[in-house]
Amino acid sequence: MAYFCSKFTIDTKITENLSEVIINLDRVDPIEFFGSNNSRLNRLKKAFPKLKLVARGTKIKVNGSDEEIDLFQEKLNQMISMLEKYGQLDDRQVDGMLEDAENGESDMSNTEPEDVLVFGRNGLRVKAKSVNQELMVDLSTKNDIVFAIGPAGTGKTYTAVALAVKALKSKAVKRIVLTRPAVEAGESLGFLPGDLKEKIDPYLRPLYDALDDMFPIEKLNYYMENRIIEVAPLAFMRGRTLDHSFIILDEAQNATNPQMKMFLTRIGPSAKCIVTGDLTQTDLPRNMKSGLPTAINLLKDISGIGMVYMDEKDVIRHKLVKQIVKAYNRLAEDEEKLKIKKTKDDNNKK
């Protein structure tokens, strides 16, 4: 919803951390939203006297502290939700909504669902959309390490990133570390153009895509430039201790046993971790064994480690993806049956 650029204004006496946000209101009619003669814009200015608000067309430019801007965006989201739901804004409801803002209070109890994990770009509300995604969220609040296992399209990575972003925004952690194995590194990366980062970035693209949904681009760039958010291949984790961080290992089925052990022993005492993987889509060479099944079996009974298993019912992509997952599952079952039958036939011949 917002395009964010963080800047620091230094006074000779006081140093203030100010932000500038440009909010695009292309989801609503600006005339209806601002009211006749900008009456509602003036009401917003009155409710947020510490912010500098400038409206031009469908955009509002906001300058002020992060805390004030967050509260302003919260109220703006409520107003947009009201307009989308009822087709109009009731001035009395808007006044009631903004009264607590004038007291510096936040109250979304009557207008926003409690299960929203993150308010992303362009008004996007990121929340769990299936039973197992909700279980994943619950397990993450109760455990320091969570394994989320399931096929493509079940929202493992997206939900994990949303939980990490929520933790960062609430200051529960100081940074986010996202990693995944670049299994093709030994064979294909050398043929790609560019430096090491440019060669590796294509394998990390799904993580960037999720972050793009949840942060304005300028804010995301600021976080990444200052290593508040770090996206790196698994090999870069060796020798580090990751504390006060929310760490995600994605595509863990492509990690070997030594890599899994290396990663899990990087976690500091004040860190959170989610490991996602699909046991049916291992891309490792045939002579290499995935470390994910071993880790699951070894760690499943340890207190503080949660496990959630997703299936086709959790698929939130195109409706055909569920059918595709089912079809491949049937193929795997048929191949396993043929393998067992062949083994029995071979034993009988002996």
Image (cartoon, helix red, strand yellow):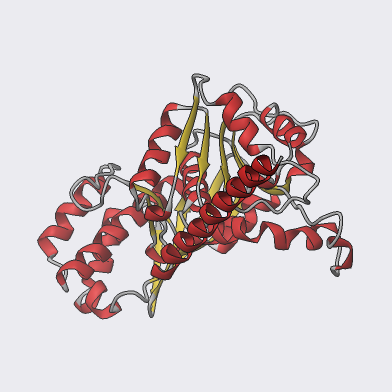
238 vs 62, left or right, is right
In what quadrant of the picture does the N terminus appear? bottom left
Against 187, is 174 above or below? Answer: above
Against 120, is 248 above or below? Answer: above
In what quadrant of the picture does the C terminus appear? top right
Against 331, is 271 above or below? Answer: above
71 vs 213, left or right, is left
Position in image of residue 60 (x %, y %) = 40, 69
Against 312, is 91 above or below? Answer: below
The image quarter containing residue 234 is top right
Position in image of residue 227 (x %, y %) = 69, 45
Mark count = 0
The image quarter containing residue 244 is top right
257 vs 341, left or right, is right
- Farthest-out residue, top: 303
Position in image of residue 254 (x %, y %) = 69, 47
Would residue 228 be seen by someone viewing this image from the given angle? no
Position in image of residue 221 (x %, y %) = 64, 58
Which residue is depicted at the point 42% across and 65% down?
323
Would residue 192 be seen by someone viewing this image from the given angle? yes
Instruction: Give 165 or 93, whichever is nearer the viewer.
Output: 165
Which residue is depicted at the point 76% across and 52% down?
183
- Farthest-out residue, front: 349
Which residue is depicted at the point 86% across and 54% down?
186
Which residue is depicted at the point 28% across and 45% down?
114
